[in-house]
Amino acid sequence: MSVITFWNNSREETGKTSAIAAIVTHMAIEHNYKILVVSTGYKDKTLDRCFWEERKVKKNLGLFGPNTNTAMEEGVVGLETIIKSNKLSPEQITNYTKIVFKDRLEILPTFKGEKLEYDEIKQYYPDMINLANNYYDLVFVDLDAELGEQLIETILNNSNLIVATLSQRLSSINNFMNLREQMPILNSKKTLLLIGRYDKYSKYTIKNISRYMNEKNKVSTIPYNTLFFESCEEAKLPDLFLRLRKIDEEDRNAFFMSEIKRTSDNIIYRLQDLAMKR
């Protein structure tokens, strides 16, 4: 049972959330893991859009006006009351998730309420993640800057593996290299490097980036792929991965799928390696 946290330290687009979506979908299809993804952002629908079409909430007119509380709250909002009463058990978390693949992949959705309520609720994310780790084989955390430095540091320290997601820009790479001199955890075996929206025709290739950053192992990537990013906008990601599961090497999507597999394998192997060294 392990917590894998995806992190980046900039406001630029690195494809962090879509990278998580790709990796957990691949793992859920190819491996027998029970996986949870925790979205810690505020009103960020990126992850939801990969799997579900947006629902319009029906309003029931009651004596005191519109009422939308007709179903059990999903995600962290639904769990808040139980957490405050110290009665939350690992098994209860699954009651507030959305299922992608039964017994394989579940999502704890992003917070969609008011900002003041989010600022109060977000303090419970570390406890929720730790509890979930007692029930799921793998807990993936989409770490959002909205949490604030203290909560981010707590979750990073509690994680078994950190996936630092960078863009392919030289400035992004240099910024990270400077930052990991200040944060030892980012310069340890506990951190895996990932380039999101990777373009294999750039001069900053996997080999060149790995050499430049003095990485012993090749940096992982999630290549830019048109079908992938379209499916992430159309709630068709699982369908796409099932369709591309068996393609030959000549297929235009073969490189994308091979890198998804390599990145997923890198995460599994690194977790196993770290577990052996405890």
Image (cartoon, helix red, strand yellow):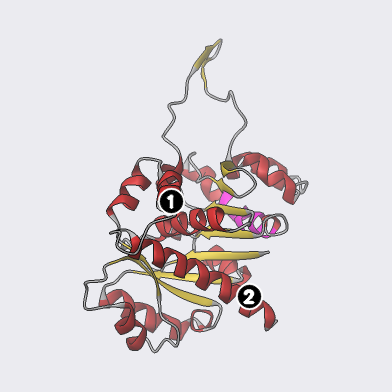
Q: Position of residue 43 (x, y in %)?
A: 43, 44
Q: Position of residue 94 (x, y in %)?
A: 66, 44
Badge 2 or badge 1: first in the primary sequence? 1
Q: Which residue is mark 2?
A: 272
Identify the element where label 2 is drawn: helix
- The dot on residue 178 is none
- 205 on left or right of 163: left
Q: Please say whether residue 217 is visible from this viewpoint.
A: yes
- 190 on left or right of 253: right
Query: Which of the 4 quarters of the picture holds residue 154?
Result: bottom right
**Residue type pointed to by label 2:** Gln
Q: Which is the main secondary structure of the residues drawn in magenta?
A: helix
Q: Which residue is mark 1?
A: 241
Q: Residue furthest right?
A: 87
- 88 on left or right of 253: right
Residue at point 38%, 83% (across, down): 177
Mark 2 against mark 1, which lies toward the viewer? Answer: 1
Quadrant where the C terminus is found in the figure: bottom right
**Front-lying residue, 45 or 43:** 45
Give the magenta-colored segment's residue range: 121-130
**Residue type pointed to by label 1:** Phe
The reply to whether callout 2 and callout 1 are in contact (CB within 8 Å) is no
Badge 2 local density, few (<14 within 10 Å), some, or many (20+)?
few
